[in-house]
Image (spheres, rainbow, N blue to C red):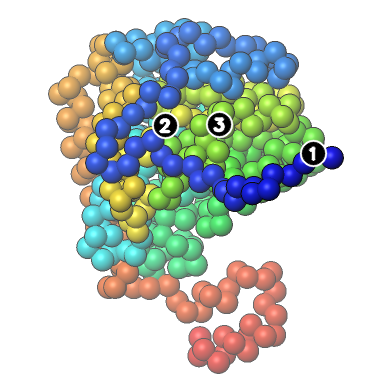
Amino acid sequence: MTPQADNPAPLRLHVPEPEVRPGGTPDFSSVKIAPAGSVRRPEVDANPEDIRDLAYSIIRVLNREGEAVGPWAGLLNDDDLAEGLKHMMTLRAFDARMLMAQRQGKTSFYMQHMGEEAVSCAFRRALLPGDMNFPTYRQAGLLIAGGYPMVDMMNQIFSNESDPLKGRQLPIMYSSKEHGFFSISGNLGTQFVQAVGWAMASAIKNDTRIAAGWIGDGSTAESDFHAALAFASTYRAPVVLNIVNNQWAISTFQGIARGGSGTFAARGLGFGLPSLRVDGNDYLAVHAVASWAVERARRNLGPTLIEYVTYRVGAHSTSDDPSAYRPKTESDAWPLGDPVIRLKNHLILRGRWSEERHKQAEAEILDTVISAQKEAERHGTLHAGGKPSVRDMFEGVYAEMPPHLRRQRQQAGV
């Protein structure tokens, strides 16, 4: 037997700490960025064992000069990219107006997408009608790029009489079957395994529709994340599993979810999944990688895990103050830049866009967003105007309303 020390040291837990606190100098030197165009593009039917390296690099298309380079470039034409730029600009303008509405007391809660617009807007372009997303609360770009009416989004945020969800969900927790946007789950992580289940059901029915699951870096610490990978890999479900690594969960940095100990994409390797990392602020790269994974799922080649390396510029939500836990200038130091500016510069370089056209588009988009807001506010806001009927609480819960709900509805006088 190994002798025991007479006075053993007390046991201690390790609590990860961010490298920089408020007041410090932002440091992203640990983020290893591959040169644009340098990461290979494997065939869609590649063996996951042969592409393990893609879980450790970062796929990029746009270089510092705004050029599209490398094997992942060339999937979208200039008109497609101009439309994508407008989608991101619309989401950013929408965010600004809704954040202002929350500060004015017109809604109780809001969550911005600042800095992450390319992830959801570009991914949506890779899907077909009927495909289903299981999103978190920061993928509204899926709806914007999919043509979902902004007025309906705002009605849901204001929980007014025209709220398509009848006041049953928190603001920004949209839902639209027709637009492939499954109801957002407030208990983060559950949507990941739900996406796998939906994809399995689609395959069982011999359907052609695929699913996409979404999760943040913090929620990869939830057990649902690992359960989703196990089921997806075992049954080769037609699903794309997306991790949006924006460096921060709510008030906690990614180290609490073991970020920095490896890449989030590499967690798929133990399940035999093809796993890729992509520059989440590069619209072209996001679309190219999404298209690769979507084609793989649709061709019955199984699931793909994608990590989008990006940065949450704003607060986690209107209930959060990021200045309490990170330097105020940290977003300025983020090495992958602003997705809107990067795509704008690329289109200017190609002669398809200009600074003047960009300002004109900003004004046109803002006018559209303000018009939608005025229309939504005609139906009410949090503290003024029309509200969903109390009767709506009892409807749509069961296919046939059971006696106890009928009694409760009668007691409520509705």
Inspect the image, locate mark 3, and give the three-letter code of the amino acid beneath it.
Ser
Q: Is residue 386 positioned above or below 4 on the image?
A: below
Disc nearest the viewer among 2 and 3: 3
Badge number at residue 277: none
311 left or right of 183?
left
Which sits in the foreground, 178 or 275? 275
Q: Nearer the viewer, residue 354 or 170?
A: 170
Percent of width and height locating residue 230: 74, 39
Disc 1 crowd rating (10 Å Cα; few below 14, some 14-19, many 20+) is few
Q: Where does residue 244 sit, x and y in percent of width and height?
A: 49, 36
Per the image, label 3 sits on a secondary structure element best described as loop
Q: Disc 1 marks which residue?
A: 2
Q: Residue furthest left?
A: 356
Q: CA distance from mark 2 to mark 3?
A: 18 Å
- Image point (42%, 72%), residue name: 388
Residue 132, image quadrant = top right
Of the image marks 2 and 3, the number of the one nearer the N terminus = 3
N-terminal-most mark, 2 or 1: 1
Residue 310, label in figure: 2
The residue shown at (48%, 8%) is: 38
Residue at far front of view = 6
CA–CA distance in space, label 2 to label 1? 49 Å
Quarter of the image that includes the N terminus = top right
Secondary structure found at label 1: loop
Going from the N terminus, do you reach mark 1 or mark 3 first? 1
The amino acid at mark 2 is Thr
Image disc number at residue 261: 3
Identify which amino acid the numbered label 1 is placed on: Thr
Of 308 and 4, which appears nearest the observer? 4
Residue 328: percent from left, percent from top: 25, 41
Which residue is rendered at x = 39% and y = 69% of the image? 161
